[in-house]
Every structure is written in C-alpha cells, then in structure tokens.
Image: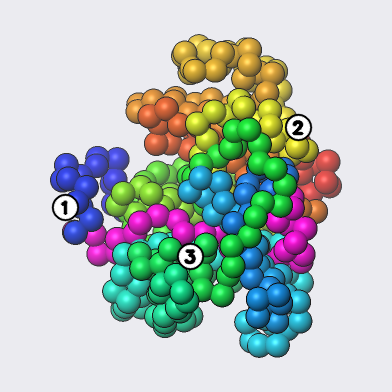
Amino acid sequence: MADTTQQSQSTPGTARQADPFPVKGMDAVVFAVGNAKQAAHYYSTAFGMKRVAYSGPENGSRETASYVLESGGARFVFTSVIKPMTEWGRFLADHVAAHGDGVIDLAIEVPDVRAAYAYAVEHGATGLEEPYDTKDEYGTVVRAAIATYGQTRHTLVERSGYDGPYLPGFVAAGPVVESPKKRNFQAIDHCVGNVELGMMNEWVAFYNKVMGFTNMKEFVGDDIATEYSALMSKVVADGTKKVKFPINEPAIAKKKSQIDEYLEFYGGPGVQHIALATNDIVTTVRQMRAAGVEFLDVPDSYYDTLGEWVGDTRVPIDELRELKILADRDEDGYLLQIFTKPVQDRPTVFFEMIERHGSLGFGKGNFKALFEAIEREQERRGNL
C-alpha cells in the first residue's frame, strides 16, 4: 500500500505532468430521484443551493427531467424519468425503484477525456460510454463513462471548450427560491462509498490501478468501532487531493453496523454520504437547521473534555456544544464537522458539513461519538 502521508516535493505543475490520470476536480454529483422537481426545491430551500440549468420536455428532453443546482464550486444534478423510452431511461427508473433516491454518478472533470478513458480501460476499468462530443452554441463538451462500485459510474468530463450553463441540451434556469444571505458551502470535500464485506481492498486497488489514485488514510480495527458495531475505511485521492473517495466496508461486530444498514436498504453498494466544505460552519448549521435540515445529535458529555485535546478552535466550545458540531485535531491542524440525518425515507444517503483549518483528516477523533449517534438513530428505526 502506498504511503501518501509524505507529499511530493515537486511543484504542482510538475506533479500534474507526472500524474497518469490528472483531474481538475469533481464536476458534479448526479442523483437519480423519483421527482426531480421536488428534489430541486428541497435542496434549494434546505441546502441553499441555486438552480442554474434545466433539461426537460420544454426544451426537447421527452424522457427525463434534470435540474442543475450549484453552491460555489459544488454542483448537484437531479434527474427523474418522465416516461422510459430508451435503455438509459429504463435504467434510471429501475435504479430509483430498487435503491430509492441515490447517487448514480460521481462525475470528474479531466483535462483530456480521451486520454483518461484510454488509461482507465487499459488498466482494467469497465467502459460504459466511449468518448463522445456534444455541441451547442456555447461550445463543445467531451464525455465518457466508466463503472465503479455497485451501479455507480464516473463520467469523465472535459469542458474547457464550453461556457454554457451546464451541458448541451440544458438551458439556463433561475433560482427555485431566494438564496440564503450567505451560501452554506462552496465545494465538494469528499464522497464516501459503501461496499460489501471483503470488497474494500478490491475497490481501493481499482482506484490505485485505474486512476492512479493513492492511499491517503486508513481506518481499521478500533479506529471505527463501538460496543456494538464496527466498520473499516480507506481513503483514495488524486495527486492534488481535489478528489477524495473514502471506501467503507462493514466489520464483524455484535450488531448491524451503519454500513450493513445502508447496504440492506440501498440494495447494494453505493454512495453513502457527500461532505461539503464550508468556511463558516456555524452560519451554515444555523441556516440549514432553520430551513428544516435535521442533524445527528451528540451528547453534552462529548464536549466536557473536548477542549483538553482539540485545543483552541475558531468556534468556542460552548457554541460547538449548542450546535452539536464535532471537532478534531491532527498533526496538520483541526477541523469542524457535523452530519445530517438521512435526507430521504430510506436510511441511506446523508451529508457532512466540514470546515477545515489545516487538517487533511476525516475526524478520526470523532468516530466513536459519531457512530454512537448513528447507532441511536438505527435503534430508533429498529435496525441496530
């Protein structure tokens, strides 16, 4: 396993040239949902995202309706089927029926789609769509797609020659609701996948080989365990750390872990949660709570000794306690984080809000408190 705790001393430009699979960052997180119009309204209202583009029957898309929402550099796309007419439409309809609302695509922006696709397929990736161009009056977008865990895909997107609202076939669209005074987040920090027992290392190896990603962090054994449940996690990332994918699998324990619960209710492997980077987690949590977003509860006892090991943070301990925000510190700095409850009826997809101050970690010091909070929710649902 590659040790990436020691970063390359080369300049960013040199590192990019040496990268066999260079990426620019996350392009979009694409959801298949039962009702895209209502999903767009929820994420506009509750998450403060701004609708920027639309595709549907009114502009020639007879099979699907898609709404594109953004907050800073974070982009979500919500697609639902109006009437299945093609293999793709039937796939989307079947996906929602089997999994509920969920992520079907973690799209990655790359500088050269053809080169990236060729490298991935040559190194073992299953190609879903060979590189192809789409054009309109705003320019040309090049795309291709490869498969990853479950029914999730990575669409590779090259949009340097395009300045339209999203993709050809989409039209600009105004906000669904008025945006909050201050946006709640500005980027996608990382996207977490859940896979079956025994499959974590296989998918880590997939990203190592197919995309040239390296191993960033590893959490096994007692790192992520409570009295009742446990899981294991490894994090892969591109050379610039702009795209980070933690991969989780369940571990043997007394009771059903959150990963087991997810796999059962999602019907297989998939994207468990998306972490969103914010510069002001206090304002973010206050605004999202006021808009109806539910966050996991943390007992007051967590905060009694927090200052002893986290030290000084931008947000006073009393305010962290009030808002139930978690804190963690490592050798590089500290972070503040909080997790929503699942955002649909099935206990599957949820979100993390994270504010980083130097730390490149994922809140290892919070794992026990976090998973005990999740277990309390599992018990309420009768799934522990």
Q: Say which label, 3 or 1, has the lower sequence index.
A: 1
What is the distance, in whole Å, between disc 1 and disc 2 at their CAs?
Answer: 46 Å
- In the displayed structure image, the side of residue 114 where residue 228 appears, left or right: right
Residue at 62% from the left image edge and 49% from the top image edge: 50
Residue 212 percent across, percent down from the top left = 31, 62
Judge left or right: residue 36 versus residue 316: right
Identity, as a three-letter code, of the amino acid under mark 1: Thr
Would residue 268 be seen by someone viewing this image from the given angle? no
Residue 120: % across, % down: 35, 73
Q: Quadrant of residue 21?
A: bottom left
Report the span colored magenta. 18-43
Observer able to see residue 282 = yes
Residues at circles 3 and 1 in contact by the CB criterion of under 8 Å:
no
Report x, y in % for residue 322: 69, 18
Q: Which residue is mark 1?
A: 14
Cα distance between the residues tagged 3 and 1: 31 Å
In the image, 256 versus 25, the foreground residue is 25
